[in-house]
Image: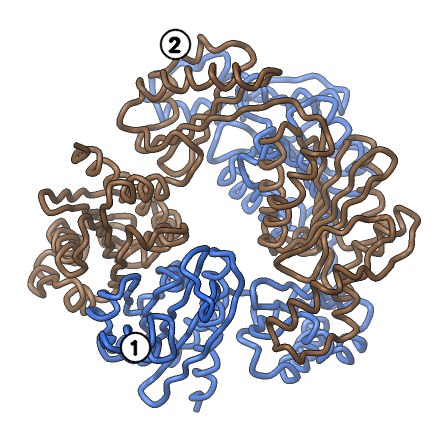
Chain colours: A blue, B brown
Amino acid sequence: MLAEIITIGDEILIGQIVDTNSAFIAQKLNAIGIRVKQISSVSDDKQHILNALFEAHQRADIILITGGLGPTKDDITKKTLAEYFSVGLVENQEALQNVENIFKRLRGPSTQLLDVNKQQALVPENCEVILNANGTAPGMWFNYLGKIYMSMPGVPHEMMYMMEDSVIPKLKATFKLPIIIHKTILTVGEGESYLAEKIADIEDSLPSYIKLAYLPKLGQVRLRLSGYGEDEVSLKKEIELFAGKIVERVGRSVVAEEDIALEKAILNYMAEKELTLSTAESCTGGYIAHLITQHPGSSKVFFGGAVSYSYELKESILGVKNETLWQYGAVSRETVTEMVEGALLNFKSDYAIAVTGIAGPDGGTPEKPVGTVWIGVANSEKTIAKKFQFGNKRLQNIERTAIAALNMLHLLLEEFKN
Amino acid sequence: MLAEIITIGDEILIGQIVDTNSAFIAQKLNAIGIRVKQISSVSDDKQHILNALFEAHQRADIILITGGLGPTKDDITKKTLAEYFSVGLVENQEALQNVENIFKRLRGPSTQLLDVNKQQALVPENCEVILNANGTAPGMWFNYLGKIYMSMPGVPHEMMYMMEDSVIPKLKATFKLPIIIHKTILTVGEGESYLAEKIADIEDSLPSYIKLAYLPKLGQVRLRLSGYGEDEVSLKKEIELFAGKIVERVGRSVVAEEDIALEKAILNYMAEKELTLSTAESCTGGYIAHLITQHPGSSKVFFGGAVSYSYELKESILGVKNETLWQYGAVSRETVTEMVEGALLNFKSDYAIAVTGIAGPDGGTPEKPVGTVWIGVANSEKTIAKKFQFGNKRLQNIERTAIAALNMLHLLLEEFKN
C-alpha cells in the first residue's frame, strides 16, 4: 500500500516555512504499514496542483494533500480538486455548522457569518466531509477510480488532530494493511563506514524483508532496521534478534536501543540510577544545558550549571584558580579539570561535564587554533580530560563539542555501570 | 529561472527526519532571484530517483539534489546520476585528497583509508566536483542538455556551507539573473495585524515592483521589502526610502534594519556601546545563553551566566535568599528580581537577564499553571520584572520565554539609549 503526500503553498517553496506536516503524516502512515512513496511540495497554482495530483495517481494508492484551504484568494485547493474530479462545489451543512460554532465560540453567540466565512463550507460534491475540530476548513475524503484522496488543512495542529482522530482510523478501516516494524539503535563516537565494516556480515545475513539504514548526524549514527511482513509477532522477534546481534557487535558505542536523542538516552539512564548532573560550559555557551533541559523531566537529573565565558566567572562560580588560567590558559587540560571538579564540588552533583575551547571564528593562535577544545567529565572517583581538534565553523564546533562531551559522559557512566 | 529541489532518503519518507534542507535551499535561491517550482522527496530507489530527475528536467532549469551520498549500500544517488547521464564513475583526485585530509585530521596522520572511504571520491565522469569542506561526500555539478544539476550531501551543515560558499556564487556566475533587492526590518513585541494596520498607507503606496511581506515568528515579525528591477542603484534607493518610512512609523518595536537574529541585533548594539551582559536562567535552561553565544564576537559583550535549575544553585550562584524561594516560590516576582540583581552583582555585568518559570509538561499548579514565566531585566539603575503566561508546550515555552526576555532587554536598552 503506497501513499503520496502533496503539500500546497508558496510559503514552502520560498523557504519561509519548513514543511513539518509531511514528516508527521509520514510517521503516522508508516506506523500503520502504509509506505510513503513521494512527498511533493507545489505552489498555489491550478495547473501545477492538477499535474501533481495526476502524477501521484500514477504512483500511489492513497494521496494525502495539505494546504491551500484558507479563505483567501490564493487558496485554490478546493476549486482545483473539484476540477480534477470534474464535479461542482456544494455547501455542506455539517461543515457550515462547524464554521458557525467556531465563530460563535471565538466572537460571541450573536456573530453573523460573512460570505467569505460561509465559503469555507463549500466542498466538491463527490467528497465525504471530515470534521475539523480545530478550524474552519473541513477535511475532504475522496474515493476516485479506486484510490483514496484526502485533503487536509495546512495549519499543523488542525492537520495533526484530523490525522490522528479521523484519517488514520478511516484508513485502517478501509484497507487491509501489511505490518512494518522499525527498530533504531543509537550509536555515538564511531563513523558510518567503520560501523558498516564492523557489522557487514550481519547486514549481509538480513533477509530481503528486513532493511538496515545508516542515519549519521554529527558524531552519532542511527542504525535503523525496518521489517515488512504479515506476522507482527515473528517479525518483531526476528528484528529484535538482528538488533541484538548488532548491539553486541558494536558494544560501548551503543547509547540507546530506541530512536531518541543522545542526551535523552543519558538522562533516562541517570534518572533510572538516581544520578545527578551539572555542567560548566565555556565555548558551548549553554548549548549542552539547553540540549538537556529541552527534555521533560530533566530537572530530576540536572541541577544546572555555569556558562563561564569570562575568566572571572570561571574563577568565581567554578573556583578555577587564577594562576591556572594565566599559566596554562583557559583552553587547557588544567583549566578544564578545575572546571569539571569545581562544578562537582560547587553544584554538588554526582557527575559533571566541563568544556572550554575556541569556537571561532576569532581567538585562535598557532598553538591553539580555532576548533581546539578541552572536554572534561568527572564523578567523585574519576576525572577524564581530553583534547579535541574540530574545524573552523563556530556553530558546528559548538554542536560537535556538545556531542563529544555527552559521549564522554556516556563512556564514564558505562565504566561505573555496576 | 526555475529550480526544483529533490531530496533523497527513506528517512524523510518514513518521517524520521523533517526535511529542513529544502527550506534553506529555497530561501537562498529566492534571494538571488531563482524561483523554486517544486520540492520532491523520494526514496533511495533507483527507478524512483530516475523518474524524479526526468520529471524535474521537464519543469525546471536548475535541479538541486540532496542526500544519498553516504558510503553505505543504501546510498545510491551517485550511481543513479551516472546512469541518468549515461556515464561511468571515475575517481576524482581532489575529492580523494579531501577524504584523506578529513580522515587524517580526525584519526591522526598515519590513518589508512578503507576501500569504503575511497569510494567517496568516485563521481560520474561528466561532473565538476564541488569541494565539501565539512565532509567526505563531494558536491557534483552537472551541465546536461542545457540544464544545471547539482548534487549535494544531505547532512544539513555540509549542504549549507556548500550552498553558500560554492553553489550560490556559481549559479550567479552561470546565469544572468534578474536584480532582486531585499530589505528586512526586524520588529519584536507587536503582532502581524497590528503592524499591518499601522503601516497600511505606506504599503498601499508601494509601486508594483516592490512587495512587502510579513514574516511572523515567535513574537517577532520581519517586514521584508523585495524589489524587482533592472537598475540596482535606483531600486536600492527607493527601497531604502520606503524602509525609512516604515521604521519611523513602527518606532520602538524595530530592533534591526537588516535580516539578523534578535539577539544578534542586541549584541551588535551592546558591543558598539561597550556594554556587557550576563544571564541567570531557570526554565530556559541555557537556551538564552546559547542564542547569544552562537554568534561570533559575543564574548565581547557576554560574560556568562548561571543555569540554575535547582533551588540550591539559585542560592549559591545567584545569591537568591532561601526565605524568598520558600515564601514566594521559585516562579515569582521576588525570585526573578533577586536572580537578575544577583547576576548583575555576582557576574559584574552592565545588564542582566533572568528567567524563571514552569516550562512543562509537569510542575504546574492551579495558581501557577504550566507556561507561567517571570522575566527580569536590569542594569545598575533599574530592574523590571514581568509575568507571562505562555502555553503548555515545553519547547515553545522555552523559545517564547527567550524572545520575550530579549525583547525586554531591548526595551531597557532603548530607555537608557542616551
Label 2 packing within 10 angstroms: few (<14), some (14-19), many (20+): few
Q: Quadrant of residue A226?
A: bottom right
Residue B241 vertical placement versus B332 (above, below): above
At a point 56% along the width and 68% down the height, the residue shown is: A219
- Residue B388 image label: none
Please name the amino acid that badge 2 sits on. Answer: Asp
| For discs 1 and 2, the disc positioned in front in the rendered view | 1
Residue at 52 percent of width and 22 percent of height: B226
Q: Quadrant of the C terminus of chain B?
A: top left
Q: Quadrant of residue A328?
A: bottom left
Secondary structure beneath label 2 = helix
Distance of mark 1 from mark 2, alpha carbons? 63 Å
**Compared to A344, does B272 lie above or below?**
above
Pinpoint residue B101: horizontal percent, then vertical percent: 66, 67
The residue drawn where x is 19% and y is 46% is B377
List x then y, in percent, for residue A330: 33, 70
Name the quadrant of the N terminus of chain B: top right
Residue type at mark 1 is Gln
The residue singled out by tag 1 in the image is A327
Which labelled disc corresponds to residue B201? 2
Regarding residue A275, the answer to whether it shows in the image is no
- The chain to which mark 2 is attached is B
